[in-house]
Image: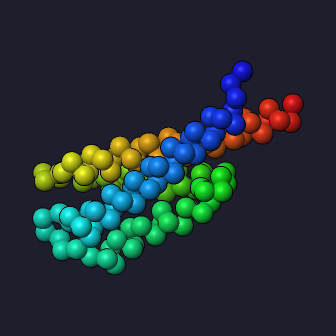
Amino acid sequence: MANYEILARRCRLITLICLTGLLVVVAIDTVIMPTRDRSPNVVVWLILSLPLLIFVPGVRRGSVNSFAWLSFVSLLYFAQSVTSLFAPWWRWLDVVHLILTVTLFIGAMLSVRYVARARRAELQ
């Protein structure tokens, strides 16, 4: 029998790392190195980062609801990164964005799963 608390902690750490990395990638993509037709824009960065920043306190606490909702919100970033990759001028940053988004989704969903299994094992 696996120790689900350890697995949940590892998934939480992966989720935190990917969440931080995704925030950095969004900052690089909008403020530091925007694509060829755009100029650096802090307002766009704030609009793109705000949905992720809302979940930071809940993820740090380990709230199951935050992980579940973060997985849903990460699908929006997944759609954005896939759309960027299909553009003719895609960059390496778009690939990093996609990898971080997919890993964030998987980490958040597995965190919910392992926390639920750990709680179920506690009750038995």
Residue drawn at (13%, 53%) of the image: 89
Residue 58 lies in quadrant = bottom right
Exactly how many numbered labels are in the figure?
A: 0
73 is higher (above) or lower (below) than 117 = below
Residue pushed farthest bottom? 43
83 is higher (above) or lower (below) than 114 = below
Please identify the quadrant where the C terminus is shown: top right
Say if residue 109 shows up in the picture.
no
Say if residue 27 shows up in the picture.
yes
Residue drawn at (28%, 62%) of the image: 28
* Left or right for 89, reference 5: left
- Judge by depth and name the residue closer to the eye, 95 or 24: 24
Residue 87 position in % (x across, y down): 17, 52
38 is higher (above) or lower (below) than 20 = below
Please identify the quadrant where the N terminus is shown: top right
Residue 94 position in % (x across, y down): 26, 51
- Judge by depth and name the residue closer to the eye, 24 or 103: 24
Residue pushed farthest top? 1
Q: Which color scheme is applied?
A: rainbow
Residue 34 lies in quadrant = bottom left
Residue 112 position in % (x across, y down): 64, 44
Residue drawn at (34%, 71%) of the image: 45
* Left or right for 53, reference 88: right
Residue drawn at (51%, 51%) of the image: 16
102 is higher (above) or lower (below) than 19 = above
